[in-house]
């Protein structure tokens, strides 16, 4: 992220000790990987970014549009209470320094936000359901209501995710986006050889960023397709649900 007050990242499959569909570097504890290996990888990551492990915040995602604000009250809770609050959450927001907000993806879209004026950061998991439910727009609206965030103040990152060319969908998914008033001529493409629609998830989320007023130069798209680059990034469509996840995170450093 091109700002001195925040650090953002997305992990790859390299540099860890995992194996098979979790190989080699999975930091997400919710997909069936060995807990001890996951903790080892989390410790490696925390050492690299300079935070204590309890400041690595990873929600249990359910493809909802539920948002959680992480504040000092959250940090004072027991680990069990914190874990309970992180259930069924797909976006996190915090104004706190040295608190790394994370989302786990393996084809879905990770989006990281930084309000450079008010200091708030956010991490969003936008699968097709969350995207159609406008989770990005909802998160930005919450940041505006709580911190006064404006579009011109925000830098956004669209992390590694499935591309238009790889994201084949059924008619029910197409209709979900259509009924949510997305511009289908922009975000969808018909592939006659497959007789299937494909949807551009990164673009569908980018449109929500633009609608909030974030300038195009402030939106940084990795343009990495997890499906085609599955040897470097986890892809559930390639590896199955019981596989590792990319961990994308953001933290304020000052």
Image (tube, rainbow, N blue to C red):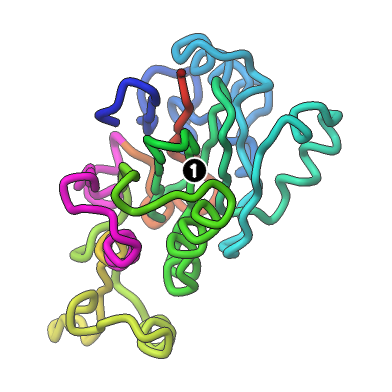
* Picture coordinates of residue 36, whole percent (x, y): 67, 20
Residue 162 appears in view: yes
Residue at the (29%, 37%) spot, across then down: 231
Residue 159 appears in view: no
Q: How many marks?
A: 1
Task: Using the rendered view, name the quadrant where residue 214 is placed.
Answer: bottom left
From the image, tell me which residue sits under label 1: 122
Range covered by the magenta-colored residues = 204-232
* Picture coordinates of residue 110, whole percent (x, y): 40, 48
Foreground pick, 211 / 21: 211
In this picture, residue 197 sits left or right of residue 180: left
Residue at the (35%, 62%) spot, across then down: 212
Residue at the (81%, 29%) spot, across then down: 79
In this picture, residue 66 sits left or right of residue 174: right
* Magenta stretch encompasses residue 221: yes
Report helix, strand or loop for mark 1. Answer: strand
Foreground pick, 170 / 10: 10
In this picture, residue 58 sits left or right of residue 169: right
In this picture, residue 147 sits left or right of residue 107: right
Residue at the (48%, 52%) spot, across then down: 125
* Figure quadrant of the N terminus: top left
Instruction: Tell me if mark 1 has few (under 14), some (14-19) or many (20+) residues whose alpha carbon lies within 10 angstroms of its own.
Output: many
* Magenta stretch encompasses residue 195: no
* Picture coordinates of residue 190, whole percent (x, y): 18, 83
Foreground pick, 173 / 114: 114
* Picture coordinates of residue 208, whole percent (x, y): 34, 65
């Amino acid at each position: 992220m091109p700002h001195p007050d925040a650090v953002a990242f997305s992990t790859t499959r390299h540099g860890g000790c995992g194996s098979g569909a979790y190989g080699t570097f999975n930091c997400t504890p919710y997909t069936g990987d060995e807990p001890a290996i996951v903790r080892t990888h989390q410790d490696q990551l925390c050492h690299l970014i300079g935070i204590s492990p309890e400041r690595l915040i990873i929600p249990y995602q359910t493809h909802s549009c539920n948002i959680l604000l992480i504040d000092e009250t959250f940090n004072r809770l027991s680990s069990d209470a914190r874990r309970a609050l992180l259930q069924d959450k797909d976006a996190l927001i915090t104004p706190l320094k040295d608190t790394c907000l994370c989302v786990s993806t393996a084809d879905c879209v990770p989006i990281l936000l930084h309000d450079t004026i008010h200091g708030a950061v956010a991490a969003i998991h936008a699968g097709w359901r969350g995207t159609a439910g406008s989770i990005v727009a909802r998160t930005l609206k919450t940041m505006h209501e709580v911190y006064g965030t404006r579009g011109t103040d925000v830098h956004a990152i669209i992390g590694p995710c499935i591309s238009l060319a790889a994201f084949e969908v059924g008619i029910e998914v197409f209709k979900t986006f259509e009924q949510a008033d997305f511009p289908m001529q922009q975000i969808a493409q018909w592939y006659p050889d497959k007789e299937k629609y494909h949807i551009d998830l990164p673009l569908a989320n980018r449109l929500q960023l633009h609608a909030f007023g974030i300038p195009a130069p402030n939106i940084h798209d990795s343009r990495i397709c997890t499906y085609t680059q599955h040897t470097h990034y986890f892809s559930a469509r390639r590896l199955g649900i019981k596989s590792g996840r990319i961990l994308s995170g953001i933290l304020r450093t000052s």
